[in-house]
Structures are given as structure tokens and as C-alpha cells.
Amino acid sequence: MKRLFKLNALLVGIMILLPLSAASATEVKIGVIDTRKIMQESKAAKKARAGFLKDLEAKRTVLKKKQKKIQAMEEKLKKKGKKMSASDRQKKAEKLEKEIKELRRLKSDLEEELKKKDVELTRKLLREIGGIVKEFSQKEEYTVILERKSVVAADKAIDITDKIIRLYDTLK
């Protein structure tokens, strides 16, 4: 909350001082982008996310196979457990418990790995988008480009999100 307040105060200060700076010798050009929209709608970001989702599905398949194996073991133990000797039943139960623990560990490791990959992918996309926005800003001589979520209100005329999406897609 403090960070948002400080950011808004800084933005208001910049907006007040910009026209005063350099005796208004240059035109103030402000743009607004919606990074979330860029990450959801750009072809380049969708392609990167598709690779991530493909990896996710492959890992989920492995997890589902392991779950089916455990279910089969449980059913077998329930059906044939009464006919087994106590020591055999104990061995099967211990093996089943070991498999269940391994499944939980595998699931936990998978979730952690996927979270890391998602964070890495998001950072990579944000770096790429940031570079494109910076280059666009210099080329088109924008004074400042702001992120939509840190702006309380803005005219749609200064929204350059679609331009950035098209630029990002052509470069990727």
C-alpha cells in the first residue's frame, strides 16, 4: 500500500514538473500499457506459455500414471488382502505406503518446479516486453510510459498496448 502511494505521489510529481521542465520546450508525450494484456494476447507470449503448458501436461501424465498404479495396488490389497498371510499383507501395505509417500513427494516437487518455471517464464517475458517498450519509447519520443495498473485514470487515446503487442509479435 505504501509502495503504491509513493508511486502515485511520484507520478503526480512528475506530471506536475514535466510541463515546467525545460520551459516546456519539448512536447510531453505520455503512453500507457497494460502488461497483463500483452502477456495474454501477444502471439509471442502465447507461444512461450504453450511450451510451458506442454511441459506441464507431460508431468501431469507421469503423475496420473503413478496415481493409477497406487489405486491398483490399493484395490488389489483390499480384494486379496484377506487371503494373504499376515506377513505378505504387511509387506504389500508397506510397499503401498512407500508408493503413496513417493507420489506425494513427486507431486510436491512437480508443483515447486512448475512454480519456478512459471516465475522464470514471466520474468523473461517481462524483460522482453520492457526492452521493446523502452526501444519504442525512444523511437517514438515518449516522455513517459506508465503501467495501466498504476494509473488511476487515463484516456484511451494514450493507451499504446496494442502497438506494443504488434511490435512484440513482429520481433518474435
Image (cartoon, rainbow, N blue to C red):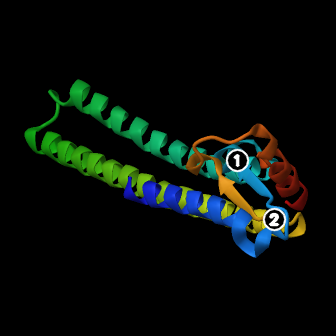
**Up/down of 9 relative to 104, above or below:** below
- Given residues 111 and 146, the one toward you in this image is 146
Residue 139 sits in quarter: bottom right
- Given residues 14 and 44, the one toward you in this image is 14
Dot 2 or dot 1, earlier in sequence:
1
Foreground mark, 2 or 1, reads 2
Percent position of residue 66, x then y: 42, 44
Tell me the element at label 1: helix
Structural crowding at the residue carrying mark 2, measured as other residues with C-alpha within 10 Å and reported as few (<14), some (14–19) or many (≥20)? some
Check disc 2 and give the amino acid type.
Ser
- Given residues 55 and 68, the one toward you in this image is 55
Tell me: 43 left or right of 34: right
**Up/down of 108 relative to 23, above or below:** above
Tell me the element at label 2: helix
Structural crowding at the residue carrying mark 1, measured as other residues with C-alpha within 10 Å and reported as few (<14), some (14–19) or many (≥20)? few
Q: Residue at x 71, y 54 (%)?
A: 48
**Up/down of 133 relative to 23, above or below:** above
Percent position of residue 61, x then y: 54, 43
The residue furthest left is 86
Residue 120 sits in quarter: bottom right
Instruction: Provide the residue designation for mark 1.
Output: 50
Instruction: Provide the residue designation for mark 2.
Output: 137
Percent position of residue 80, x then y: 23, 28
Quadrant location of the C terminus in the rendered image: bottom right
Separation (CA) of disc 2 from disc 1 = 29 Å
Q: Residue at x 71, y 50 (%)?
A: 33
Tell me: 37 left or right of 150: right
Tell me: 93 left or right of 117: left
Q: Residue at x 53, y 49 (%)?
A: 59
